[in-house]
Image (tube, helix red, strand yellow):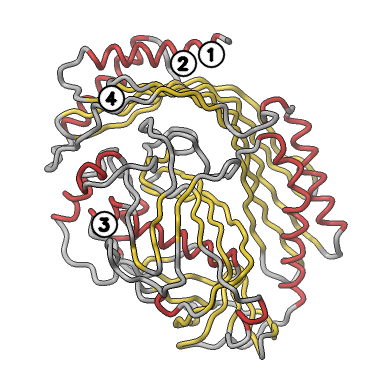
Amino acid sequence: MTDEREDALDAMDWLLARFEEDDAVAYAEVGGVYEEKTDAVVTHEGPRDRVSFAESGVWLRTFADGAADYRYTTSLDEESLEDEAERAVRGAGMLAQSDPARFDAHTTHRAVHEGWAGEPVGAVGVDEKVAAVEDGIAAAENSGPDLRRVWVNYADAHVEETVGNTTGSTVRTTLDRAQVTCSLHLEGGPKVRRHAGSTEGAAFLDELPAVFESAAADARALSAANVADAPTGEASVALSPRAAGQLFHFVSHYLEADTGYMGMSPYAVGDRIGPEGLDIEDGVRAGSWGARAYDAEVRPTTPTRLVDGGEVERLLHNTASAAEDGAHPAGNAVPSLGHGQPPRIHARHLDVAAGDAGERALRADADVYVERFGEPWFRDEFERVQRAGVFPASVLYAKDIDRKTEERPDCGSAEFPIAEGYRLDGGERAGRVEDLSLDYDPDVLRTLSAFGAARETTTGVCEKHKSHLPFAVTAPGVRLTATLKADQ
């Protein structure tokens, strides 16, 4: 074991002992983390930046006076650790949270999970990783003409983490997480952006050519299409599996318990939000970009049926919200990428059930076909501010925010700009649409009229209260009715 790994474990043990002796601390979690990271930027002109480094750190979440505070530091000497511990205890106490958080003082987990990587990403040198990206770009360029600009960010982390808490749980996990974000641009056409991610380790490098070739094919199809007059007002819209995945990921935020506590969710358990064919489960697929064996609260990650037959069956919880609502936590306290921000209640890998419609049938009666959406714009200003702002590590503080605000009828509504889309004529593409957005309101899912038989997986990184969280969605294409409006 290297000194860096030992330092992280020693820091974790020191902090746990310190919190166990502190009468002001009701409960604490501490994670010792050793990471080997790579970050590289490659363009069509060649590599621009590349860096590979190791980092040891420790994160801590303390409960004091019924509230929680979160810290992460790479300074592992005792003086620095004591300073972070003191700040965390004081920060939780100063929050003045109205509803004290409860935690599980009885269930103990002890486990080791070695991840899903056959070969760790750390076993491959940075030059070899950059070469794999360059091979992927070359495959995209060779698959057709006129690919003018390509920008790729590749990042990975081999993470060895041991998490303990003051009730006796200890879990050691290994995770090899790699991702690539690419942007392709053809002359005269819009940009095409794609994300791909995996926890399968070095095997992910073999997938890069297919990722770039697919993105290049989409870019060429968009560029070859003339700009068409787009319909506005109520329209029938077909969504690709990628666009549907984006939409269902958006909807899953309203099934997070803390979103409801803050008064921002239009949905509650028992509500009908879609037709009987709508089934959504949050699970953990081995090797998925969003997969983890245990969450930040040392809970095993288990599947959760969120929507069954169009009705909300349950919400996403961490241990505090589960205790508050009489539910069972399923490992949805998802750590932030890099550990710099607190874990948040979040979905891991959404699985949306397929239907029986072929692609031609999905588009047959539709006016517009959407390949990909841009980032949604929330109509309610409070919701925009709260989603983008910093939030304490104590989930029940959301209720204090709700008590201080008025009713917000526009919460749960947003505009989805269509980043890649086509006008349809008889089910066939009749030109691309530009400067067009889809209006989402809480009743839109009720208009779902068809589910595709084929499914694809969409991945990305979501920001929730400054915490950057991985997400994955496996979904079919769908058809729905919504209002389309021209962008101002």
Q: How many angstroms separate mark 4 from mark 3 (CA)? A: 25 Å
The percent coordinates of residue 133 (x first, y second) are: 76, 43
Instruction: Name the amino acid, label 3.
Output: Gly
- Cβ–Cβ under 8 Å for marks 2 and 1: yes
Which residue corresponds to mark 3? 260
The mark nearer the N terminus, 4 or 2, is: 2
Which residue corresponds to mark 4? 28
Q: Please state which of residues 206 and 52 is positioned toward the viewer in this rendering.
A: 206
In the image: residue 272, left or right of residue 372: left
Q: Please state which of residues 113 and 3 is positioned toward the viewer in this rendering.
A: 113
The percent coordinates of residue 423 (x first, y second) are: 63, 84
Secondary structure under the numbered disc 1 in the rendered image: helix
Decide: is 454 above or below 206.
below
Secondary structure under the numbered disc 2 in the rendered image: helix
Residue that sits furthest to the bottom in the current view: 426
Mark sitting on residue 236: none
Q: How many angstroms separate mark 2 from mark 3 (CA)? A: 36 Å
Decide: is 438 above or below 318.
below
The mark nearer the N terminus, 4 or 1, is: 1
Q: Please state which of residues 46 and 442 is positioned toward the viewer in this rendering.
A: 442
Q: Please state which of residues 467 and 259 is positioned toward the viewer in this rendering.
A: 259
The mark nearer the N terminus, 4 or 3, is: 4
Instruction: Name the amino acid, label 4.
Output: Ala
Instruction: Name the amino acid, label 1.
Output: Glu
